[in-house]
Image: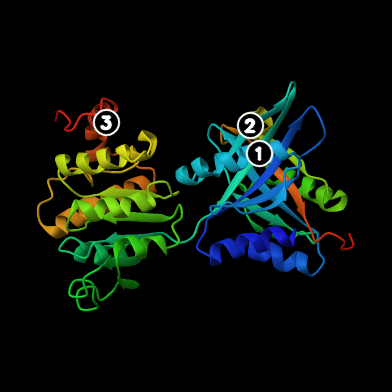
Amino acid sequence: MSDFYKKVEDLIKEGETVAVATIVRAVGSVPREVGAKMLIRRSGEFDGTVGGGCGEAEVFRSAVDVIETRKPQMVHVDLTDEIAMRTEAVCGGHMDIFVEPWFVEGAER
Amino acid sequence: MLALTRAISAALDARQAAALTTVVATKGGPELTGAKMVVTSAGGRTGTLGDARLDEQVLEDLRHVMETRKVQTKSYELGPGRDVEVFFELFMPPPRLVVVGAGHIAVPLAAMGKLLDYEVVVIDDRAVFANRQRFPTADEILVDDYEHAITNMELNPSTFIVLVTRGHRHDVLSLRKVIQKPLAYIGMIGSRRRVYAVLKLLKDEGVSLEHLAKVKAPIGIDIGARTPAEIAICILAEIINVWNGGRTAGISDEARPKFLRALQKDEREPEL
């Protein structure tokens, strides 16, 4: 299996709920490809990247929610708008990032 | 969710490919977002996407997704106004090159296959050809009947099969065993006439044109190869092209439409 899921497995085995963010759709010029993944823990520690500055802050906010509620969310990151320009994260495309909880059923939240 | 990760590990340990499928969006009907299912190239399933018919459709699409090895999101209609989007994530076993026939071309083919980091298996029914002296770097050398050896091999969407046997009878026997399996690549050496004779035989046995069209034959890309080593490069170049989604046409791409037309008309020999 990929190292990524090995890591997920190791963490959830210990009872932790983690968030996994995946780029599931990308249009135009985006920093990473469809399938790029990021593991985010409640502590804020993370592994992997879904594109750095370009939208990753939003993914972090969503991940906190997802870990709390254990409900998945879709984060839409638009890298074409003016705000993106001001933050210099100008990539030109947009992407959908699916953020979902991974946990062992029955484990405490 | 440990059942899912374990199913993926088990599949890879058994040299199968696996896909983790996830509903990432639901429109209309019950909320299925977040539902997950692991499906393997051997047809195994763990978990459910929450709708029996959807599970079936996803399983049906899996083969194509594995052959193109493209991580992607696909849409499915479950009923009027009910749509879901399913994300496919693939887990592939390491690429494996199976060289069927241990003759002159097999030697550089197996050696170069190792340079490309493939697992290399060589099969021949003659021990004077299939041996360690001729194939010092191969991972496995099988001295066995072709048909028997191939039947017992785990074939998966990371497997490249190269048929370089000494006679078209052996090609037929081998091809018959593998042509309907999900494979990354299947190529067969031979002149256009020999290749057509093999395809015609299989067609007469009832193999579909769709399956026959997957065979890369005549094998390789046209680089004017002459020596065994050059031919090995021409074959491996085609394999790399297929595996990495390159855009170079193979020799078979030119021959295929003619073959298929002739097969459809049941001609004994194609017009070449």
Query: On what subunit does the disc labeled 3 rest?
Result: B
What is the quadrant of residue A77 in the picture? Answer: top right
The reply to whether callout 2 and callout 1 are in contact (CB within 8 Å) is yes
Q: Position of residue A27 (x, y in %)?
A: 57, 32
Query: Which residue is tagged 1?
Result: B86
Which amino acid does the dot numbered 1 rest on?
Val
Residue B123 can be seen in this image: yes
Q: Which of pointers 3 and 1 lies earlier in the amino acid sequence?
A: 1
The quarter of the image holding the C terminus of chain B is top left
Mark number for residue B263? 3
SS for callout 3: helix
Q: Is residue B153 left or right of residue B129?
A: right
Q: CA distance from mark 3 to mark 1?
A: 38 Å
Q: Position of residue B235 (x, y in %)?
A: 24, 51
Q: Position of residue A25 (x, y in %)?
A: 61, 37
Which amino acid does the dot numbered 2 rest on?
Ser
Query: On what subunit does the disc labeled 1 rest?
Result: B
The quarter of the image holding the N terminus of chain B is bottom right
SS for callout 1: strand
Q: CA distance from mark 3 to mark 2?
A: 35 Å
Within-10-Å neighbours for mark 3: few <14, some 14–19, many 20+? many
Query: Which residue is tagged 2?
Result: B75
The residue nearer to you, when weighing A21 against B56, is B56
